[in-house]
Image (tube, helix red, strand yellow):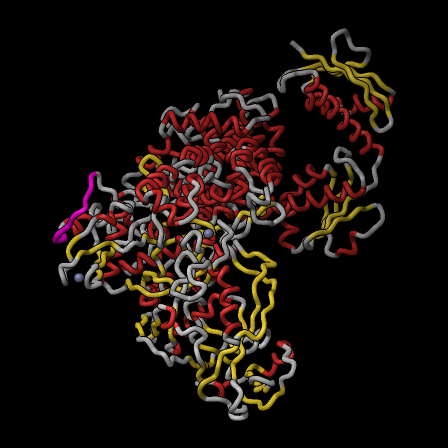
Amino acid sequence: MFHPVNSKTSFPQLEEKIFGLWKNKNVFERSVEARRDGRRFVLYEGPPTANGSPGIHHVLARVFKDVIPRYKTMKGYYAPRIAGWDTHGLPVELEVEKALGLASKRDIEDFGIDKFNARCRESVFSYLKEWEAITERIAFWVDMENAYVTMDNDYIETVWWAIKEMWKKGLIYQGYKVTPHCPRCGTSLSSHEVALGYQDDTEDPSVYIKFKIVKGLPSGLSKDKPAYFLAWTTTPWTLPGNTALAVAPDAEYSLLEGEEDCLVLASALVGVVGLEGYKVKEKLTGSQLVGAEYEPLFNPHEFGVERRRFQGSSELQLQGADEKLTYRVIATDFVSMEEGTGIVHMAPAYGEVDYDAGIEHNLDFVHTVDLQGNVTGSYPFSGRFVKEADPLVLEELEKKNLLLRQETIRHTYPFCWRCETPLLYYAKQTWYIRTTAIKDDLIVRNDEINWYPEHIKYGRFGDWLQNNVDWAFSRERYWGTPLPVWQCESCGNYECVGSVRELEEKPGFSGFKEPLDLHRPFVDEMTFDCSKCKGKMRRVSEVIDCWFDSGAMPIAQHHYPFDNKTLLEDGRFPADYICEAVDQTRGWFYSLHAISTLLFNKRCFNNVICLGHVLDAKGEKMSKARGNVVEPWAVVNNYGADALRWYFLTSTTAGNVYRFDESMVAELSRRFLSTLWNVYSFFVTYANIDRFTPAKEAKVEPSELDRWITSELNQLIVDVDKGLGGYNPTEAGRRIEGFVDDLSNWYVRRSRRRFWKSESDADKLAAYTTLYECLVTLSKLLAPLTPFLAEEMYQNLVCSVFADAPDSVHLADFPAADEAKIDKRLGDDIRLAMRVSSLGRAARSQAGIKVRQPLAKVVVRLQSGKEEEALKRVAAQVLEELNVKGVESVDREAELDKPGYGVVSEGGYSVAICTEISPELEAEGVAREIVRRLQTMRRSAGFDIADHINTYYQGEAYIGQVMADFADYIKQETLSSELVEGVPEEGVFTERHKLSGYDIALGVKRLA
Ligand SMILES: [Zn+2]
Ligand SMILES: [Zn+2]
């Protein structure tokens, strides 16, 4: 006997029970260990940060990370999965800053880097319990007890080793980088962070500045009036850093003469600027202006600021003082003729294009602002925050008569998304990894990777590699892997350290404190002697980008090469599979790929699924501010983890965006999980009534219907294997859904009476055996996708019967198809019967004729003679499905269009039903209605499905005649021993009905 299965169930409750079973029996660990001798299958878990609650998008990634290794395990692979946690980085620091009320880097340093980092270390795992709970609840099987943690000393040591390897290859260098910089947070923002913080309608100065021409004066200007280039800016604080003016070489420029001076600007913008009292004296092209020299607005040497010069690269050379300093006009291709003056003020320290032009034209580089955004040097506005300095800069220029006009504009400006401080584009000293040196290798190694969806490979990811720029990987922060570079205080010599031991063995090493902690400030206190001059080596202050940490996980989690020396050869590298959202093409996917190419010139993963983002039901981004964030627990508690998994796996193909709507989870759960559950419940209920016991090698005589569903089942195994093997769980899931639909709506429905009939014959045994095989196989096919429901079915159908079976479906093997049982022709035949039946039912409903009313004929038009042959083979099924007496086929559509017929067409098929009902057909229809009422009454009276009854009836003569004519049929269908005319005795369940206009009273009585 199977454990009884109610047709109604609560999936969340069921899952709690299964979850307990897995825990008690250690099923995950055992499923891995059981395959120890199998080929390895390696998943790299992209480490999340556990200092915030897991969101619905984390659940999405975790479902996809889970399904493939589960499948591979069932296929015999040894697939240990190790969890990991990303622990470093700015988000962690910000949480702590907020909690401690610290407002700047100075505050942090006053508080103490040691205490600050200790707080970061504590805060990293503040949501760990929540992460572990949701991970377990959605059945993402991953080893969390042995998780790797990026802040561990061993992990950091491997990262140091990796950096030292790159250092030895000359791939690490120091340069400047113009980045959007938040002066409050004291750090750069990545481009996607910048995108988060644009504010419209920001008020800024809009000023026209005059640059005094000293050499290469345009010919037509009067010698006794001073002449100026006119430029425009909205960031006056950058003007002391001006070192060039840019023009468009092909554009036309005008020389204008006023009463006191002469101005040069683009002809197209003269009207826009509006210069009253000035007259055009001459016109010339931009290229004629190139090389002209002008006086700096502020000579840096007068204000104690250093001047450096580009030498064709990011390297800058210090320049000596020059009282007669001039700058020059250059030609570039980015000068706008839409706004400004057509002459662009260039400050290479404060803009990315300016910086690049600096390298290209060997411009000077003058930096007058510190990391807090305050002006340095001895300007009248020094010490001020740049935005406060703006008006003072203009005041100074006004005094020098270099300010033509001052207005304000409202425009869109980027602010720090965390603290709303205006961002400054700002050149900072930064450590780079020269990834451009291995660009070709990055591209070649990418050729070897399978991307799902495929277009990412040469699209989003391939483009990213094609346009590769060096990786600016240092961060001027506190809580991160310290950059293992030491610099000599005396001679400036740099040394990179690749291990703790190397550090300890340095001559003159000191500053070590027990216990070892490879974080700031402890690492900063370790010093040693310079190998060149015996000066003191101190660590540079930077930590590294936490993307480097997570990208080093293939080796760092195993403390390679200090431990696990065979890692690269023993099957643990590269990964067989990784999966994250598509934004990781520039994040973790890239850092993994770059680091393994830099170190080993090898690919890091063989297969990668890129998931689309999860938006809300309206297609909008989820955010706390909008209040549209979906809480994963609520969904799991309402519908169960299987339902959520099924939604993520099948609602759209991986890579597409999810418009998350809880009602969709409900709908898919109803459509699939409940349908399967009903079939399962139906089977168990009848199998228990008949005391059906499955045998291991059942010898049965299958009917055509059995052979058909067995054929479909074996084809399904082939398809699901192919889907999961091809990293397409969506395809696999949808095929299973289609099969379950056929199983429920064709096989089981058409087999009902085989299960209902009272005698236990060979046909009944064949039906039970076939349906049993379908359900058991489904449990195994579904195990990777909906692990809970699969387990429930397997426990009841298999474990309760076969003591020697694996005690969990997740310990079972993936089913193998018996391709000899796949009968393509039979499959096509039944598909045709389904199609004709479905169109015929539509035709009936269009004509308003109930299904129970038998009809004389159905006429069909098919697409080929072959199909007409097939129709003959499945005619009996079509007649039964459509409750008609005959079927015929015609060649032409026109033949269907005749009076007395109702037609429905679809996809090149037409089906017409004869709508004329003879008295005989009507009587049969009434008999069927009576049967249906009696069956409903049996249920209402609380009888068991197998109970035998007596039926009572009273009605007009017509009813009596129908009861008599169809007595055998009615008795058989309702398990009635007798049909008794007259008033029923006491205690009989009775109801009155009206059928085809006739009144009838019916009664049912259970027989002992
Ligand atoms: Zn900020
Ligand atoms: Zn030295």
| Quadrant in the picture for residue 941 | top right
Above or below, 354 against 255 in this view is above
Identify the residue at image location x=41%, y=41%. 96
Q: Nearer the viewer, residue 512 or 148?
A: 512
Q: How many marks?
A: 0
Report x, y in % for residue 581: 47, 50
Report x, y in % for residue 800: 44, 23
Q: Quadrant of the C terminus?
A: top right
Identify the residue at image location x=38%, y=81%. 324
Assess whether residue 659 is covered by the magenta stretch: no
Report x, y in % for residue 290: 46, 85
* Left or right of 766 on screen, residue 119: left
* Left or right of 636 on screen, residue 100: left
Q: Nearer the viewer, residue 932 or 381?
A: 381
| Quadrant in the picture for residue 494 | bottom left
Above or below, 781 against 772 in this view is below
Q: Nearer the viewer, residue 901 or 962?
A: 901
Identify the residue at image location x=51%, y=44%. 649
Identify the residue at image location x=34%, y=76%. 312
Q: Which residues are magenta?
A: 506-514
Q: Which residue is farthest front? A: 399
Q: Nearer the viewer, residue 446 or 304?
A: 304
* Residue 315 visible somewhere in the drawing: yes
Above or below, 436 against 28 in this view is below
Report x, y in % for residue 164: 23, 57
